[in-house]
Image (tube, rainbow, N blue to C red):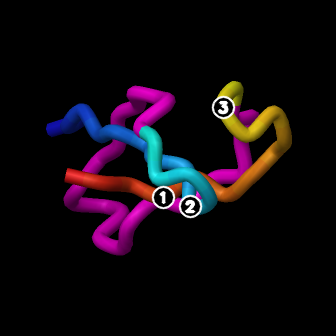
């Protein structure tokens, strides 16, 4: 039911975080504001393949 997803920074495009979500309940892509160690700031991270 829950699938593993990767979150990538929108600024530097690096993949920083792994997470999971229920694809049947949440059909849109996940977008979370998290800390990017490469940018050294809090940026928006979007779900990638």
- Name the residue at 20% across, 37% down: 3
| Residue count near mark 3 (Cα–Cα under 10 Å), binned few <14, some 14–19, many ≥20 | few
Mark 1 or mark 3, which has the lower sequence index? Answer: 3
Residue of label 2: 10
The magenta segment is: 15-36
Q: Residue at x 38, y 67 (%)?
A: 29
Q: CA distance from mark 2 to mark 1?
A: 7 Å
Lower position in the chain sequence, tag 2 or tag 1: 2
Question: Which element is circle 3 on?
Answer: loop
Numbered disc in front, either 1 or 3:
3
Q: Which residue is mark 1?
A: 46
Residue nearest the observer in this picture, 40 or 42: 40
**Foreground pick, 6 / 2:** 6
Q: Marks 2 and 3: which is nearer the front?
A: 3
Query: Decide: marks 2, 1 in contact (CB < 8 A)?
Result: yes
Q: Main secondary structure of the magenta part?
A: strand
């Amino acid at each position: 039911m829950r699938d593993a997803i990767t979150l990538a920074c929108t600024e530097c495009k690096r993949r920083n975080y792994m997470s999971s979500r229920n694809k049947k309940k949440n059909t849109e892509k996940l977008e979370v504001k998290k800390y990017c160690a490469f940018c050294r700031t809090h940026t928006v991270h979007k779900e990638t393949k």
